[in-house]
Amino acid sequence: MAEAWEQRRSGEEISRPLDTRPPFEKDRARVIHSAGFRRLQAKTQVLGISEGDFHRTRLTHSMEVAQVSRGIVYTLREQLKNVNHPLHGALDKLPRVGLIETIAFCHDLGHPPFGHGGESALNYMMRDDGGFEGNGQSLRLVACLEAHKEGFGLDLTRRALLGILKYPAALDNLKRKKAPAIPGRLEEVRISDWRPPKGYMSSEGEIVSWILSRLSVQDRDRFTEIVTPTEDFTNAKPRYKSLDASIVEIADDISYGVHDLEDGIVLRLIGYEQWIEEQAYDAEWASQFGLGSYADITKDLFGDSEDARKKVVGDIVHALITSVELRNDTSFEEPILALNAGLSSPAEKLLRSLKELVVRHIIKLQTVQTIEYNGQYVVMSLFEAMSSDPQRLMSPHFVDHYDGAPTPMRKRVICDYISGMTDSYASRMFERLFRPGFGKVFERL
């Protein structure tokens, strides 16, 4: 089965003289050199890229997620080296560093311009055509759209695609029973009504079938189970994820909760008054992992010393990484489905509290929300314009894809075009289309 996870969907492996890299290292190189990865430098993480040049973008965030993911793998490896660990025999099932970095680099690859506002905007515009979700678009990019091998995207290994898949359920199977009423104008769309469920688009159903084809029928059926809500206006969600996806998810949460908190402190969006709302700091857990008292870390976070702040941020990240544990669900036959990473209870409570702090005092900030509203309107307006006359308004590359696509997939091509835009490209395109006097014939977008 190990060889099956290293297989590529094309069935081919490029061989170059003296190239000794294993398959997962080749995956990593393909992602780093992809156009989608480079575009992350100009896409919003939490604060828009036009707000300054200090805080994280999608690219720097993805690099930090990769680094934290590496740390988690090393932590789990050390735990499992202990012959008395109940999962000692699973040591060889842990992902290699090149593999986990590949998945981490890809985890936000499919996110559109303007963050989650852009994601919900595209989901609204695609509501009758398969929907849109950032993780699902990441899979679509690496498996179909990116340039490496025509028809296969980057042609990554099966295990890398399994980790990138993350949510093994189709959006069409996760949609709530009742949808909100459709407003008459784009300005009236409440984006909170159109946040997508977490899953893949049905257009990638064949790819997902290939990824899961090496599993037993029992494992495949169980792995793709969904949790169905009782409320009519709540989306369903997948029940399980693979080992590699669980590691990257924790790394993503750590980067979001701690590093975005650091951005908020430096940019003075989060001060001492907001910080003291945090009540989940477990002193006993903290001392076990070398963290100081709550008073000590508060002093370092909000003091005058940048060095002290950076050190305490690093200490918190280290404590969270080393609190990751491996769990085993014996109902699965395949080890990389049975094994999942999770945080100890005190670490999980602290991280949840930090993430909530970021949401309350950065993401829900009125100025941030108005920028997000502007971004969602730009995305929806571009989609509406492109749909009216795609051959005229899209780039030649996407026009070729549009003309060659079957009718039911043509809106998906428009969605691909817009989701691949950076924040600045989308803004310039909007100005060129809708604001008189902006844009010149010989001015490149």
Image (spheres, rainbow, N blue to C red):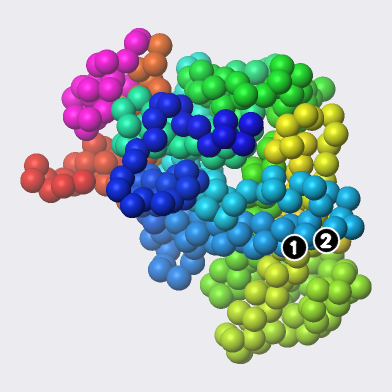
Give x and y (percent) for residue 302: 67, 82
Residue 135 % position (x, y): 54, 37
- Looking at the rendered structure, which numbered label has been put on residue 78? 1
* Residue at point 29%, 40% (across, down): 430
Q: Residues within 10 Å of mark 2 (few under 14, many from 20)?
A: few
Kind of residue at disc 1: Glu
- Amino acid type, mark 2: Asn
Can residue 111 be seen here? The reply is: yes
Q: Is residue 345 above or below residue 420?
A: below
Residue 367 screen position, x and y as percent: 52, 57
Query: Is residue 391 magenta-colored?
Result: yes
Please tell me which residue lies in front, 271 or 397.
397
**Is label 2 in a helix, a strand or a loop?**
loop
Q: Main secondary structure of the magenta part?
A: helix
Q: Is residue 372 visible?
A: no
Q: Residue at x 65, y 18 (%)?
A: 173
Mark 1 burial class by Cα count in 10 Å: few <14, some 14-19, many 20+: few
Q: Quadrant of residue 152?
A: top left
Q: Is residue 274 magenta?
A: no
Q: Position of residue 181 (x, y in %)?
A: 59, 20
Which of the pair 179/423 is nearer the observer?
423
Which residue is found at the position 79% from the left and 66% from the top?
278
The residue segment tinted magenta is 387-407
Q: Quick check: marks 2 and 1 in contact, CB under 8 Å?
A: yes
Residue 146 lies left or right of residue 173; in this view the side is: left
Q: Residue 182's image quarter?
A: top right
Q: Which residue is mark 2?
A: 82
As measured in the structure, the alpha-carbon distance from the residue carrying label 2 to the one carrying label 1 is 7 Å
Among all residues in the image, which is located at the extreme top?
A: 407
